[in-house]
Structures are given as structure tokens and as C-alpha cells.
Amino acid sequence: MTGRQRALLGVIVGVTLAVVAAVGVPMNTLADSIRGVRPEAVLGVSAIFLTQQALRAARQRLLAEGLGPRGSFAEHHAVLCMSFFFINTLPARLGELARPWLLQRRVGLPIGAGVAVVLTERLFDLSAALIMLQLALVSAPMPEATISLGDRELSLASLARGLALTVLLPASLGALALGLTGERLVGLGLRGLGAARRRAPDRLKTVLQRAEDGAQALSGNLIVGLNVLRAPRRLAQALGLTAIIWAWTGLQYVALAWGLGLELPYLGGLGVLSVTMLGTALPAPPGFVGVYEAACRGALGLFAAPHAAATALAFALIIHWGIWLTQVATALVSFVWTGLRPAEVLAQSRRNQSA
């Protein structure tokens, strides 16, 4: 799939989900809900996000120091702020390609090592999202809703908890196993993919060969990053920082729920956070427009007390764009401090994508 095709798919998905998120919401009621939010709740969301950025910069520095120059905390913080501005603004997560280049430019980390840092972080964050969702589904109170399946009425809460045990538990354990065993598990997966290619019909061999080549390229960088964590102390620090980052970030959702008069327990907030994290992995237009709102509103329907549709959409819009504006502000400060221009970083990201 070409870059234009991915961008077009993202727009289609985003527009579709934006319509889904807005279904049943009168615009005048939505405007009233947004105007009625407590300002201190919005400021609290921004303050939590700023702290999260600092924690993520500390984790990035921890992972990078085992692969090259350590760099100062200020440099890592600036790199992270600029990178996530592009990730949260451009389509197809193009900002992920900016971070390795920025790490090379500002910290002196080789490009391959920068890719390893990004992949290792993403593996840790995926594990965290799966674990948070599992905790929320198993422990958070959920509405007593049912769905009809033929002549049977099934509890939505029971279905969700069954999903946690049958799908999310194995997935989270698999992600953690990959993080802890690294090279051995990756090698096993590559051997399995190679065996499947050799036994596949001729018409599928080319497709599987491309998949195998791509997996080998990515896994090589991932193994480099995971090998850094063989030191028990560094692994414990990385796991601890990841747990703190996402436990702290969940407070954003609880704070905004309070600001809108919405009842959302802390574990429910972790559930909403994890669903939005996983939802933004879908193809999306710039800024995750529509995708974030649909994921957030759907998660609120599962984890929050009964509420008006306008309140849920107001929640999704405020937290999405409030965080984005805070991200833009920190990125602008970082661009001024480093002397880099956004156009320069964007051009390099496009060159990295072509490569």
C-alpha cells in the first residue's frame, strides 16, 4: 500500500468514525456540555500530561544510554516533545520516523539505535495498554447492559470479562514474554514465518517473502533495544517507569470526568485510556480525528456511569484536543530551544519513510 493509499484509508476511517461518534448528539447540547466543564479540570489534564512527558523522556533516556551517548534530560525531553507533535498531527504515524533522526541530531544516537528505542518503547506501551484494559474489564464496575443473541440475553459485562481472560490475558503475556526473552522468541517467530512461506502456494510466496523481509528488518532493531534490558537494574527501571507513566496518565480521564460531572472510577479511567491507545493504532487521518473520539466515547459507554451522549462526546473532544494543544505548546518551545524547523524534521521523516 502506497503512502497516498494509506492516507486515503485513514481519511475514510476517520470520517466514518467521526460520524459514528456524533450519532445522537445535538450540537447545541454538545456546546453547552463543553462550556460547562470546570476550567480547573482542564488545567489538571494539561498538568498531568506535562508530567507524563517528563516521565517518558526519562524512560527514553534510560533506553538510549545503553545504545550510545547518554545525552542530557533536556535534550531527550525536547526530542520527545517534537516527535510526539508529529505523531499526533501527521497521518500514518509519520512522527515515529522523526524520532530516530532527532535522537541522532540532538543526542548523537545512531539511527538504528533510535529505531530500537522507539520499537522497545512501543512494545512496553502495548503491554501496558493490554494489562490496563484487562484490569478494567475484570475489576471496574460496568453498566448492567445486555445484548440479544437469538433467544438468549447476554450480559455485556460478562462478555467483556470473558474477553479479558481469553484474549487480552494471552496477548499481554505474549507481549511481556517478547520483552523479557527478546531474541529467542523473535527468532522462533521468524522461523515460523519462513516455514509458512516455504510451504505456501506459489501465489502467496511473494507476499510472505515481503512480510518476512519486513519482519526481519524490524526485529533486528527490536532485538538491539531489548538486549539493552538484559541488565536487571535497567529492565526494572524501564518496567517501573512504564507502570508509573500509565498509572499517572489514567488520572487525566478521572479529572476530566469530574470536571464534566461524569462518574468514572479510576480503573474505568484506565479502561478508557487503554481503549483510546489501542484505537489510535487504526488507520487514521491527521490528528487521529474521529478515531480518538469514537474510541473514547465507546469506552465511556462501557466504563462510566450512565450519561448523556453529549457529555461523552464533549469528554472525548476536550481531552483529545486539550492534550493536543498542550503537545503543540511544548513542541513549539522545543523547536525554539533547539533551533530546528518543523519543515526540516518533516522532510527528513519523509526521506526516512522512503528509505
Image (spheres, helix red, strand yellow):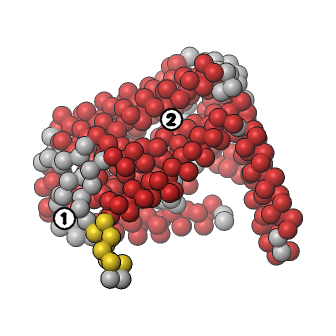
Q: Position of residue 93 (x, y in %)?
A: 55, 50
- Pick whichever, 51 or 349, lies toward us: 51
Q: Which mark is residue 82?
A: 2
> What residue sits 45% from the left and 26% below the top?
55
**Which label was assigned to residue 239?**
none
Kind of residue at badge 2: Met
Residue at disc 1, secondary structure: helix
| In the depicted structure, whether residue 191 falls above or below residue 220 | below
> How many marks do you count on the picture?
2
Q: Position of residue 244 (x, y in %)?
A: 43, 29
Question: On the image, which quarter does residue 203 sit in?
Answer: bottom right
Of the image marks 1 and 2, the number of the one nearer the N terminus: 1
* Residue 211 versus residue 348 in the image, above or below: below
In this orientation, which residue lies closer to the viewer: 292 or 198? 198
159 versus 349 height, above or below: below
**Location of residue 65 in the rendering, given as x and y in whole percent from the top left corner:** 64, 21
- The reply, left or right, for residue 208 in relation to residue 324 is right
* Residue 27: assigned label: 1
